[in-house]
């Protein structure tokens, strides 16, 4: 995955937290970004975070759709409506973080596999060179 995509995930999560902060400000319950970050951290459960990248992308799309529906709602928003919007923003931020972590871990796994393949190729190459050297050195061919 490209670095640009990871930056977009970080930006979406950051903007979602800023939107939550703004919603709380409108409710006259100001919160710090650090508080929201802690809340986000507490709601992440890695042992429940299974699945493929496609599922994570679908989750983000569902979050965005739900937020758009809530933002384009006609009429005065009730406290319950604002809480649902805050929850949607938090869910979006969490899904962006989960996806970022997933991509990072997949990248690390790919690097480990590539390193193992490289090590295996180097080891096999050395064995072939050693075998060829010993065969010619002792005229065993």
Image (cartoon, rainbow, N blue to C red):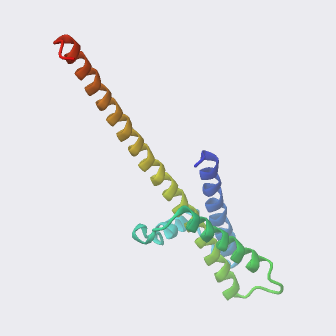
Q: Of residues 138 and 23, which is closer to you in this image?
A: 138
Q: Quadrant of the C terminus?
A: top left
Q: Of residues 137 and 34, which is closer to you in this image?
A: 137
Query: Furthest-right residue in view?
Result: 74
Which residue is depicted at the point 69% across and 81% down?
82
Which residue is depicted at the point 24% across and 21% down?
130
Q: Of residues 123 and 93, which is closer to you in this image?
A: 123
In the displayed structure, 22 sits above or below 76; it is above
Task: Residue 92: name its quadrant.
Answer: bottom right
Q: Is residue 35 left or right of residue 70?
A: left
Q: Is residue 38 left or right of residue 74?
A: left
Q: Position of residue 129 (x, y in %)?
A: 28, 21
In the displayed structure, 85 sits above or below 46; it is below
Q: Position of residue 42 (x, y in %)?
A: 45, 70
In the displayed structure, 41 sits above or below 67; it is above
Which residue is depicted at the point 61% across and 65% down?
57
Which residue is depicted at the point 75% across and 79% down?
69
Q: Position of residue 117 (x, y in %)?
A: 37, 39
Q: Position of residue 101 (x, y in %)?
A: 49, 57
């Amino acid at each position: 995955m490209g670095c640009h995509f990871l930056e977009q995930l970080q930006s979406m999560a950051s903007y979602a937290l800023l939107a939550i902060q703004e919603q709380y400000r409108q409710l006259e319950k100001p919160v710090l970004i650090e508080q929201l970050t802690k809340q986000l951290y507490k709601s992440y459960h890695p042992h429940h975070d299974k699945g493929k990248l496609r599922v994570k992308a679908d989750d983000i799309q569902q979050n965005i759709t739900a937020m758009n529906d809530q933002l384009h709602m006609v009429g005065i928003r009730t406290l319950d409506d604002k809480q649902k919007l805050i929850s949607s923003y938090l869910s979006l931020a969490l899904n962006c973080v989960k996806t970022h972590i997933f991509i990072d871990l997949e990248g690390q796994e790919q690097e480990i596999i590539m390193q193992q393949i490289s090590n295996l190729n180097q080891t096999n190459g050395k064995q072939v060179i050693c075998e060829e050297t010993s065969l010619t050195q002792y005229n065993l061919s």
